[in-house]
Each structure stands twice: as structure tokens, then as C-alpha cells.
Amino acid sequence: MPLQPIAPREPAHQAAEHILRRAILRGELAPGERLPPERELATQLGVSRLTLRSALAMLDAAGLVTVRHGSGYVVRDFVRDGGPDLLAGVAELASERGEFPDIAAELLRVRRHLAHAALERLVEHPPTPAAIHAVVAAIDAMASVGADELALARADLAVLAAVLDATRSPVLRLCLNPVTTVVGGSAALRAAIYVEPASNVAGWRLLAAWMTRPRAEDLERILAVLAARDAATLEHLSRGRRKPRRSSR
């Protein structure tokens, strides 16, 4: 497949990696397909062979290509071999194809299940007063943001980060990071999530209150609320229009 030379707006090895990554995620370079020889591929991209090797090393680390002795670089099946760091690229391509609502539904589903694990952890290991204070401070900061979607997304992620810090579980934090990054990085999804910012803040305040006395018997009710909010988000996303919004001030 002919590849376009890179644009000089970013480091050459990153630009080359980006072009090849998109070609793989799009399926233009299929699993099992052998990449052109280094010299030919470097010429197509307009980079040196040393730069190309740096790009290929990044793709190898991401589980997108592998080196086979005597065969050069071969494309891997990223769905089977890749990691959650590929979610952003998958979501971007789904958006270009008009398939983002389906991807968004799965992202929110995964986030909800991970949230369940985080709440169970808080029941088993109740948060410290300092951790709860950090969550409340993050919520107060979110309440002062106003209606700007990007600022709300950043503040919302700050609250989530404080809640995850309260669990004292690096595993949960690492699992949720890529999902929340994609969710917060999508303009369309932000518009659907923050239709009524005051309700987002209110939901966080209820969770903060629960954290002062986390009980397992409350989990089913909390998860039902999360599921209902996600369903409303997906409905807004599918309709492609936004309701009048109230400030969270």
C-alpha cells in the first residue's frame, strides 16, 4: 500500500509511527501482512532508515507489528495482541466512520465495571479522612468550573483520580486511565456527558458522602444510577443534539 510522506509538524519518528499505526488500525495493513523492506518503506515515508526503525520499535512495543527472522516486520492482530493504549486510535477511527456511538457504549460499559471494582475496594478498605477530603476538594473545584465542556472534563477526571487514589489500588488506576482518557478526549462524548453539569457534581457529592461510610449493600443502587446516566449519555450522543444546559455554579 503506498504511504504518503510525513508532514514536518512533529518529530519524524513519531509522525512515521502515527501513519503506520493508522494504516494498521484502519485495516489497510492487514494482520499477517509483511511490511515493505526498510529502504522502500523509509522512502515512501520520506524519512531515514534510522528514523523508521525508531517508529517500528514503537509499533512493536504497542503490539502492532513484530519482527520475524528472515521476513522483516509483520503486522500483528492488534485486537488480540494490543493493549488499552490503542483505545484512543480505535475511537478516533470509529468516529470518522460514523460508528462512535457503538464504541462509546462499550467504553462506558467498561468504565462502569471498573467503577464497580473501585467501589468494592472502598468497601473492603475504607478511605482515610484525608482521601475523602481530597475528593470533596476536587468536587468543589469542578462545581466552580461553569459550563465549558473541556474544563468540565478535566475537572471530572480530577475527581475520578481522587476517588481512585482513595482506593490505594494501582491496578484499578492503571486499568481506568486509558478508558477515562478516551472518554474525556471525545468532544461528542463530552457534549453528551455534560448536558447538565450540576447533575454531574451532585452525583459526585453523593458518592463522597457514601465514602464516609462505604457499605456493600449500597453498591447495587449506585451501579443502577451509573447505568442510567450512561444510558442517558448514549441517547444524547445518538440523537446528535444537545439540551439546554444549566451552569454548575
Image (cartoon, rainbow, N blue to C red):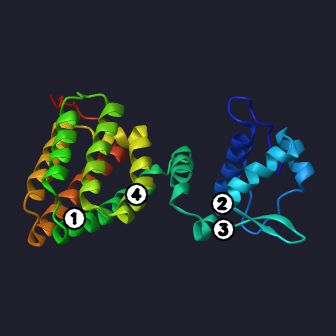
Q: Residues within 10 Å of mark 1 (few under 14, many from 20)?
A: many
At x 40% / y 48%, what residue is drawn? 183
Asked if the residues shown at circle 3 and circle 2 are in contact, with their CB atoms under 8 angstroms apart, the answer is no
Q: Is residue 164 found left or right of 220 in the rendered image?
A: right
The local secondary structure at tag 1 comes to helix
The local secondary structure at tag 4 comes to helix
Measured as percent of width and height from the top left, residue 218 is found at 10, 67
**Amino acid type, label 1:** Leu
Q: Residues within 10 Å of mark 3 (few under 14, many from 20)?
A: some
Q: Which residue is mark 1?
A: 119
The local secondary structure at tag 2 comes to helix
Measured as percent of width and height from the top left, residue 77 is found at 66, 68
At x 80% / y 51%, what residue is drawn? 53
Q: Earlier in the sequence, mark 2 or mark 4?
A: 2
Measured as percent of width and height from the top left, residue 61 is found at 66, 60
Q: Which residue is mark 2?
A: 61
Q: Which residue is mark 4?
A: 107
Q: Is residue 236 found left or right of 225 in the rendered image?
A: right
Could you tell me how far apart the alpha carbons at marks 2 and 4 are, in whole angstroms? Answer: 23 Å
Q: Earlier in the sequence, mark 3 or mark 2?
A: 2
Of labels 4 and 1, the one closer to you: 1
At x 22% / y 69%, what residue is drawn? 120
Asked if the residues shown at circle 1 and circle 3 are in contact, with their CB atoms under 8 angstroms apart, the answer is no
**Amino acid type, label 3:** Asp
Q: Is residue 109 found left or right of 210 in the rendered image?
A: right
Q: Is residue 140 found left or right of 237 in the rendered image?
A: left
